[in-house]
């Protein structure tokens, strides 16, 4: 039996790390503030759809 392949691949823009947190510094009480940044190409999913799957879906 052949292995099944998924229609979704790892995003080439973020290499599967779709959300990162960027440190903006520390507050006077010592806590660290962060901002979340998501990959604009995959919109935070970490995967991209293959062109063949898009063609089958009519997109």
Image (tube, grey):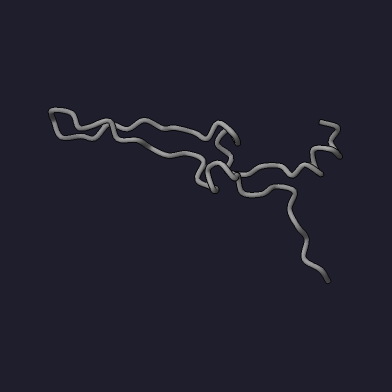
Of all residues, the one furthest to the left in this rendering is 28
The residue shown at (32%, 32%) is 34
Of all residues, the one furthest to the top in this rendering is 28
Q: Quadrant of the C terminus?
A: top right
Would residue 33 be found to the left or right of residue 21 on screen? left
The residue shown at (51%, 41%) is 18
Quadrant in which residue 54 is drawn: top right
Q: Position of residue 17 (x, y in %)?
A: 50, 45
Q: Position of residue 39 (x, y in %)?
A: 52, 35
- For the image shown, how many numbered marks are present on the structure? 0
Quadrant in which residue 43 is drawn: top right
Q: Position of residue 47 (x, y in %)?
A: 62, 44
Residue 31 or residue 23, whichever sits in front: 23
Residue 48 or residue 13, whichever sits in front: 13
The residue shown at (81%, 44%) is 52
The residue shown at (55%, 36%) is 44
Quadrant in which residue 56 is drawn: top right
Q: Quadrant of the N terminus?
A: bottom right
């Amino acid at each position: 039996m052949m292995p099944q392949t998924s229609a979704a691949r790892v995003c080439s823009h973020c290499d599967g790390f779709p959300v990162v947190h960027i440190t903006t510094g520390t507050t006077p009480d010592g806590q660290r503030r962060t901002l979340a940044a998501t990959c604009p190409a995959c919109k935070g999913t970490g995967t991209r759809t293959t062109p063949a799957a898009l063609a089958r879906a009519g997109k």
